[in-house]
Image (spheres, rainbow, N blue to C red):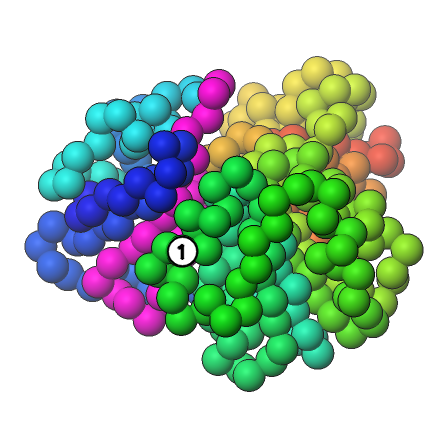
Amino acid sequence: MADKTFLSPSLVAVGLRDPDGRPLPRWAAGSHVNLVLAEGLVRPYSLCGRTEDRGRWLVLVRRHGASRGGSDHVHDRLRAGDRIGYLGVLPGLTLAGAGRYTFVAGGAGVAPLIPLARLADAARRPWSLALFGHDARQVADWRELADLRHAVTVAREREDIASVLHDVRDGCAVYTCGPEPFVAAIDRVLADRPGVRLFRESFEPPAGAGGDSPAVDLVLARSKLSFSVPAGTSLNEGLRAMGVEVPVSCGAGFCGACAVRVLRGVPDHRDGLLDTGQRAANNVILTCVSRSRTPELVLDL
Ligand code: FES
């Protein structure tokens, strides 16, 4: 780890460099990286620095009240010079073509939106970034955002979501990332604007995910395997039980590591990552949390 900057008592920015000065792997705006913080402690984070900077990665880490060890480790124990590994960079949100972009961030959800906003800015498209959360002001004042500040606003109250989105019209793209209730609120505000594309990412699966999970029959087209995944068992666990390994990182439907192509059947999307277009297309499923609306799913495995 190269540097650590507290933006607020609960939000820290961590800069990462290769210890031998070698260039870091390329990444695209919206990507995640799985960081190996310590032995057995792997967590996905959105990269929020500059895509052209091969010398330094930057991530934001919010301390969670219910930390499973990752955020506490970063906040309390990680020091400049400590070694951190990574397991690879995964694609996340990508910038779709649109006439205008509105980025709406809930707390640390600003991380993947920063490089996407830079892309929109470089393309000379009209865009704005609204920051929500108790430390939104500190994020807005962060020097890493200095080049974007002209289009960044701070909104303090959740009730402002509707006003932030009031002028979003057909042909616009809205990108949001944050806690699931925040992202769901944006979803609701835009529900009656079919001409607006919503791209969403949340820190946890939507409400209802992991709840009712009936049995589903899986057919693996390439492996020529078919079997039933019992109720209460994730598709990923069912696959593993049959000796089919699908990578898992967050295990909660927000990083995309476990995505599999769907060839037939209709997924019951319970993740917080796929955008409205991807959900409607029904040709990919995040196997760690999602289920099936049809008795059978045929997967490209
Ligand atoms: S493992 Fe992260 S979305 Fe499934």
Q: Is residue 287 above or below residue 20?
A: above
Mark 1 lies within 8 Å of ligand 1 (Cβ measured): no
**Outermost residue, right side:** 192
**Outermost residue, bottom side:** 124
**Outermost residue, left side:** 20
Please say whether residue 89 is visible from this viewpoint: no
Q: Secondary structure at mark 1?
A: helix
Q: Where is the C terminus found, in terms of image quarters?
A: top right
User: What is the span of residues highlighted in magenta in the rendered image?
Assistant: 41-66
**Left or right: 298 as drawn, with respect to 136:** right
Please say whether residue 77 is visible from this viewpoint: yes
Q: Is residue 271 above or below residue 263?
A: above
Percent from the top left, x then y, of residue 128?
A: 60, 67
**Kind of residue at disc 1:** Asp
Q: State the residue in front, 282 or 206.
A: 206
**Left or right: 83 as drawn, with respect to 28:** left
Percent from the top left, x then y, of residue 26?
A: 34, 64
Q: Decide whether residue 79 is among the magenta residues.
A: no
Percent from the top left, x then y, of residue 81?
A: 12, 41
Q: State the residue in front, 87 or 70.
A: 70
Task: Please rate how many residues cluster around mark 1, counting C-alpha atoms within 10 Å: few if below 14, some from 14 to 19, many from 20.
Answer: few
| Residue position for label 1 | 141
Q: Is residue 69 above or below residue 100?
A: above
Dividing the picture into quadrants, the one containing residue 71 is top left
Percent from the top left, x then y, of residue 166?
A: 80, 61
Query: Residue at 85% across / 67% down in the picture?
Result: 195
Query: Residue at 54% across / 69% down in the picture?
Result: 151
